[in-house]
Image: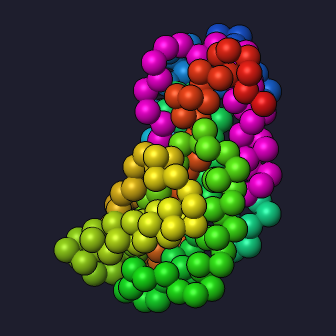
């Protein structure tokens, strides 16, 4: 299965290069094909696809502007403590940023109430979002495979919602949050048979990606 995924990813990359619209700092492909490849690559990477369908094609130049903008977002997020920051591709084939918080940092075992120390960290993260109101944000909660769906699904949803609620209390406009969803024990990122793996699977993921307003600004050449 791993070999098949790598082969598929290689084919996707070959398609990107052959189309000739890949840019160093921008969209993988600035046409409708970018959304398809973004979704494929996101699935291979184990990420639930983020990014709503845009109202029109995104040109390579606009994609490059968005890419440069998201580089700045990534740099701000990397200054956060206890957060893993990754560059990803959204469903539109555009550069996006994923921030993962270990649930052990945010919550007590089997709880969805934020602890005091995590509130301070999320307050700093809120500053990243408030400084860039054109960012769209998805929050996803996950658990390990211990327990059943009747426990894990609502727990993951409540944890994701707790993060969104607190960020809103910190001044982040609620309109920035496009999807706040719990996925229970699905989409594990590590082996649930080990304690270390289960700890990695207990997580909250925050995705920052281009909103329609940001895409419109990029298409107009005004995005900084």
Q: Nearer the viewer, residue 67 or 24?
A: 67
Whole-percent x and y of residue 25? Answer: 78, 30
Quarter of the image for residue 223 reads top right
Q: Is residue 136 shown in magenta?
A: no
Q: How many marks?
A: 0
134 in relation to 192, above or below: above
Snapshot colouring? rainbow
Identify which residue is drawn at 51% across, 67% down: 169
**Quarter placement of the C terminus:** top right
Compared with residue 88, is residue 33 higher up or lower down, i.e. above or below?
above
Majority secondary structure in the magenta region:
helix
Whole-percent x, y for residue 154 in the image: 27, 71
Residue at position x 66%, y 74% from top?
121
Residue 118 horizontal/vertical position (percent)? 60, 80
Residue 32: x and y, percent?
50, 15
Q: Which residues are magenta?
A: 50-77
Extreme-left residue of the structure? 150
Q: Is residue 87 visible?
A: no
From the viewer's perspective, tell me whether residue 48 is left or right of residue 123.
left
**Is there any visible trace of residue 120 in the rendered image?**
yes
Q: Residue at x 69, y 30 (%)?
A: 66
Left/right of residue 62 with respect to residue 142 in the rendered view? right
Residue at (53%, 86%) from the top-left corner? 115
Quarter location, residue 113: bottom left
């Amino acid at each position: 299965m791993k070999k098949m995924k790598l082969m598929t990813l290689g084919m996707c990359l070959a398609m990107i290069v052959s189309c000739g619209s890949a840019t160093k700092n921008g969209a993988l492909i600035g046409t409708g094909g970018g959304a398809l490849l973004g979704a494929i690559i996101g699935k291979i990477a184990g990420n639930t696809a983020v990014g709503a369908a845009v109202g029109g094609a995104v040109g390579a130049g606009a994609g490059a502007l968005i890419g440069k903008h998201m580089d700045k977002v990534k740099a701000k997020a990397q200054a956060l403590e206890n957060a893993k920051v990754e560059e990803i591709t959204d469903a539109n084939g555009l550069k996006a940023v994923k921030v993962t918080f270990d649930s052990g940092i945010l919550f007590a075992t089997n709880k969805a109430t934020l602890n005091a120390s995590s509130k301070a960290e999320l307050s700093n993260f809120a500053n990243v979002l408030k400084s860039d109101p054109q960012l769209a944000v998805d929050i996803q909660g996950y658990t390990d495979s211990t327990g059943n769906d009747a426990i894990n699904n609502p727990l993951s949803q409540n944890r994701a919602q707790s993060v969104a609620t607190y960020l809103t209390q910190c001044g982040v406009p609620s309109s920035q949050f496009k999807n706040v969803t719990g996925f229970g024990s699905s989409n594990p990122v590590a082996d649930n048979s080990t304690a270390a793996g289960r700890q990695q699977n207990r997580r909250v993921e925050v995705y920052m990606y281009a909103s329609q307003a940001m895409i419109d600004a990029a298409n107009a050449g005004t995005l900084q």
